[in-house]
Image (cartoon, coloured by chain):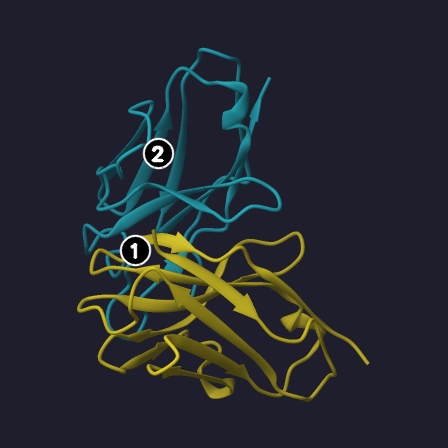
Amino acid sequence: QSALTQPPSASGSPGQSVTISCTGTSGDVGGYDYVSWYQHHPDKAPKLLVYGVRRRPSGVPDRFSGSKSGNTASLTVSGLQAEDEADYYCSAYGGINNPLIFGGGTKLTVL
Amino acid sequence: QLQLQESGPGLVKPSETLSLTCTVSGGSIRNRGDYWNWIRQPPGKGLEWIGSIYYSGTTYYNPSLKSRVTIFADRSKNQFSLNLGSVTAADTAVYYCARSGDDSDIDYWGQGTLVTVSS
């Protein structure tokens, strides 16, 4: 089972926008609209930000938005804030024999 | 509000079996459509899905761990558990239990528990 590919790091200044990519295959990211994104602060449980490619759970600010094109999904964080500094993970459904695959994670730094 | 709490030994010897239990409160593991997952994060590394048990009892495992993993549920106690056999130092990680739905979205997580494999 290969992890989805994410850039190891990303950065931006407060107020700016940053986009994190998540690349898979036609068997996972490209094949289903079951891509999720999580925010993970150290020593805390991950938090669901986006599911179903672009849907947000209640309580998640609309600064966080998801999209997908082909085998690559993306998370855009707009209006960067200091508290957005965290690790971000994507996940995707990979079929009945590979139900859940995570990306390797992206460390977002707010400069 | 759904809450999940992991419990189990924090230290396991190499070659032995790692056993963890997740106690669910504020909801039932028999709730239709829910998947109950185990996920881990080795120190300095990313998240890895270990496997899950569906509300019906069907299990799904990460192909790379399948030969060593068993996930089972105790509905009377509203708990589900993980057994990971023949552990090595590479199995040292923070282990999370979590719930997901049909969209493969993990919306509730336990706080995580560190398990160290060492003699």
Numbered label attached to residue A75: 2
Q: Which chain is yellow?
A: B
Query: In the image, what residue type sits under mark 1?
Result: Thr
Please identify the quarter of the rendering in which residue A76 is found.
Answer: top left
Number of marks present in the image shown: 2
Residue for point 55% across, 20% down: A82
The chain letter under disc 2 is A
Please identify the quarter of the rendering in which residue B2 is found.
Answer: bottom left
User: Quick check: A74 left or right of B71?
Assistant: left
Residue B27 % position (x, y) = 30, 63
Marks 2 & 1 on one chain: yes
User: Quick check: A49 left or right of A12?
Assistant: left
The residue that label 1 is drawn on is A25
Residue sitting farthest toward the top: A15
Numbered disc 2: secondary structure: strand
Residue B68 % position (x, y) = 51, 86
User: What tint does the image give chain A?
Assistant: cyan
A52 vs B14: above or below: above
Residue A44 % position (x, y) = 56, 46
Q: Earlier in the sequence, mark 2 or mark 1?
A: 1
B65 vs B40: above or below: below
Query: In the image, what residue type sits under mark 2?
Result: Leu
User: Quick check: B101 left or right of A3?
Assistant: left
B69 vs A6: above or below: below
